[in-house]
Image: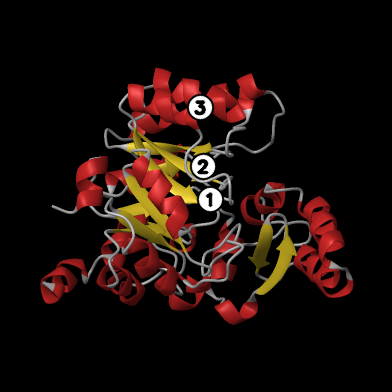
Amino acid sequence: MNRVCEVLGIEKPIIQGAMSWITNAEFVAAVSNAGGLGILGPNAGQKDITSDPNETAERMRREIQKTRELTDKPFAVTLIGSGNSTSVFTMKILDVVIEEKVPVVLINSYGFPGMLGIDKALLKPLKDNNIKMVVRSILPSVEDAKVVEEQGADVYVATGFDEGGTLPPRMIGSFNILPMIKDAINIPICLAGGIADVRTANAAFALGAEGLYVGTRFVCTDECPVAPHVKELIAKSSATDMEIFRVAPSYYRSLPTKLRDKLMENEHSLNRADVYEANKKLMGGTTGMRIGMMEGDLENGYVSVGNGVSLFDKIMPVKDVIDELLAGYNEGVLRLI
């Protein structure tokens, strides 16, 4: 049996990206009901931000409970780790995850030098409660993957520079970083970045991935809470329509919006230190994603997707996307054997 499926209790080796604002209970349940692992992102189901850690946690509790009403299959909640200084927001959500008996967490870790692996503040409670850990580092590396494996994580996600959202500081493409990390660890590994059709899925499996971590392709599904006209924009776009710009901690890319144009002006006119700060203020963190992708405001928000956007042109149900991505999976495994 596929090890990702076995350890996570799912039917198909595909994990939906957390994608910050643009997940909710309905979307996550659709992925899990179709056999994959749906993940509630940090702001799942929300339309505004709160600065209260307790309210943040209770919002997540409500979304977990909604998801459970819609599926009896495994799903996950996102925890954002940061070396040895994980935020009080994350710790409050961890408490809710334990109380609600969520079976899996996605740990988005920072993975910078000196901050490798999972924060111990997260590690012990998760192990004590037998919660499965999928770990995705913002700076994936052999060193980080080895530490994560030693800490007892269940699945490691190797993220290539082809992804959407917050880009890794090192410009290593998905199909180069995967075998590099695969050769260094023994736990199951998934690939994130650029997986958007059956060809890229088969390529990932051929290079040693045991699962796929998919964001951009799932954005253009009926169940995803992205604004309909933004889905249409994404479906009609290609990687050549995007621009890349610097913002802390490294880079971002976006399809054309008025905000994107301002970010690019800063990229071309400011020095490195100043552009990080200026673009951070303009983007408002991931708030700009909510404005651009959920609210559909293409003047004041941004639309961040991965390079795999070139590989599809249809908006489909989640189940059909999963079936399409995995259409060659069994054939590919047999061919490799």
Residue at the extreme bottom: 240
Of the 4 image quadrants, the one containing the C terminus is bottom left
User: Considering only order in the chain, which callout, 3 or 2, is on the residue closer to the N terminus?
Assistant: 2
> Hey, what amino acid is under mark 3?
Ala
Measured in 3D between alpha carbons, the distance from the residue under mark 2 to the one under mark 1, in whole angstroms, is 6 Å
Q: Amino acid at mark 1?
A: Met
Q: For the residues labelled 2 and 3, say whether their Cβ atoms are less than 8 Å apart.
A: no
Instruction: Tell which circle, 2 or 1, labels the residue nearer the N-terminal end.
Output: 1
Residue 86: x %, y % from top left: 59, 32
Q: Is residue 191 left or right of residue 210?
A: right
Above-or-below relation of 274 to 46: below
Mark 2 is surrounded, within 10 Å at the Cα level, by few (under 14), some (14 to 19) or many (20 or more) other residues, namely many
Disc nearer the start of the sequence (1/3) = 1
Structural crowding at the residue carrying mark 3, measured as other residues with C-alpha within 10 Å and reported as few (<14), some (14–19) or many (≥20) = some
Q: Nearer the viewer, mark 1 or mark 3?
A: 3
**Residue at mark 2:** 41
Q: Secondary structure at mark 1?
A: loop
Q: Nearest to the eye among marks 2 and 3: give it.
A: 3
Q: Label 1, on which residue? A: 19
Give residue 288's position: percent from left, percent from top. 71, 52
Question: Residue 239's image quarter?
Answer: bottom right
> Between marks 1 and 3, how big is the CA–CA gap?
24 Å
The answer to whether residue 223 of the structure is visible from this angle is no
Q: Secondary structure at mark 3?
A: helix
Please give the label number shown on residue 121.
3
Mark 2 belongs to which amino acid?
Gly
